[in-house]
Image (cartoon, rainbow, N blue to C red):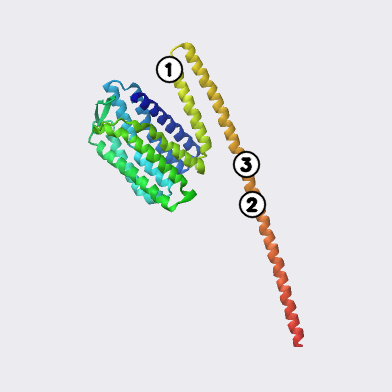
Amino acid sequence: MLIIYLTISSFINAITTTVLGILVYIKNRKNLLNKTFSLFCASVAAWSWPYFLWMLIGKTQESALFWSTALNVGAIFTPITYLHFVSVFLKIYEEKKKLIKIGWIFSLLVFITGFTPLFIKGVRPQGLIDWYPVPGPAYHPFLLVFGIFVFYCWYLMFKALKKNKGESGLPIRYVLIGTLLGFTGGATNFLNLYNIPIPPYGHGLVVFVFIFTGLAILKYHLFEIRIVLTELLVFTIAGISLVQAFLFQTFWTKLLGLGVFGLFCLIGYLLIKSMHKEIQAKDELEQKVRDRTKELQESNDELKRWYQLTIGREVRMAELKEKIKEMEGKK
């Protein structure tokens, strides 16, 4: 049951991070927030896909060693991409730029050792899992830095929450809750590396990082997330239905599965297309409202100028009358 759970949760993590990262990036390739979030997604996807294949086909010692090494190499860039995203999200990137550069250099140095025994030196039977990776000497500093970066990001978000209370702090709170759940759950994968006999039951919580970040984005429209999440849902269900179709045993059940996949793709396409039209219509309406508001503001400014001119003229007339009266009184 543990293997089935880890296989399914890894697939969900993998497809969620892959699709969400791609969609967020293509929505605005120039926006630094989009780019750093997509990098964070890519790093988690690079960990999730080999994890999924490790659980699915890593039955022999050789294949288990390859896939468990690949997933840990994929995890190397997770802490630095997380810090990079959080610093941009909290608008403190310029302050943390030096630390981020150091983090990237450290990650690249660790990556060089990734497929060597310095990082993962082998696999061994571990509890309910046939073959579990054995960390090498380079793995320990990587894991230490991983923990430091994650805790530091949490500290930065807690600090930002003190300055942003109420509505303005909600997106930070969502991202913080999601990453607290996701990284805490994901940390259970490290326990068996050090012979702590606790299965990685928290593995399925990793997806909450992106669910809660999605909620933050949805509420504050950082990435046009309504469309993004709809596309993510369509691609995820379509992917699951396609995999399921090929898992069927007979020709007719496979054909039925592919038919369901095709039908869902058509429905998904129409749904996404209608949402794009809805967003476009909304944008056009908002633009018309902005244009009309600008026109009204200009008209209002013009009326104010005429009013000031008229009042000014009346005041000057009154002043002239007073002067005339004064002059007449002196005569």
The image quarter containing residue 41 is top left
Indicate the position of residue 178 as horizontal and vertical percent values. Answer: 41, 39
* Label 2, label 3: how far apart the Cα atoms are: 15 Å
Q: Which quarter of the rendered picture does the N terminus lie within?
A: top left
Indicate the position of residue 19 as horizontal and vertical percent values. Answer: 46, 32
Q: Residue at x 58, y 38 (%)?
A: 279
Residue 249 seen in this snapshot: yes
- Crowding at dot 3, Cα within 10 Å, few <14 / some 14-19 / many 20+, comes out as few
Indicate the position of residue 115 as horizontal and vertical percent values. Answer: 28, 30
**Residue labelled with disc 1:** 247
* Residue type, label 1: Leu
Vertical position of residue 305 compared to residue 84: above or below: below
**Residue labelled with disc 2:** 294
- Mark nearest the camera among 3 and 1 is 1
Please tell me which of labels 3 and 1 falls first in the chain: 1
* Label 1, label 2: how far apart the Cα atoms are: 59 Å
| Badge 3 element | helix
The image quarter containing residue 58 is top left
Indicate the position of residue 71 as horizontal and vertical percent values. Answer: 33, 30
Which numbered marker is on residue 284? 3
* Residue type, label 2: Lys
Q: Residue at x 45, y 36 (%)?
A: 211
Nearer to us in this view, 272 or 155: 155
Residue 29 seen in this snapshot: no
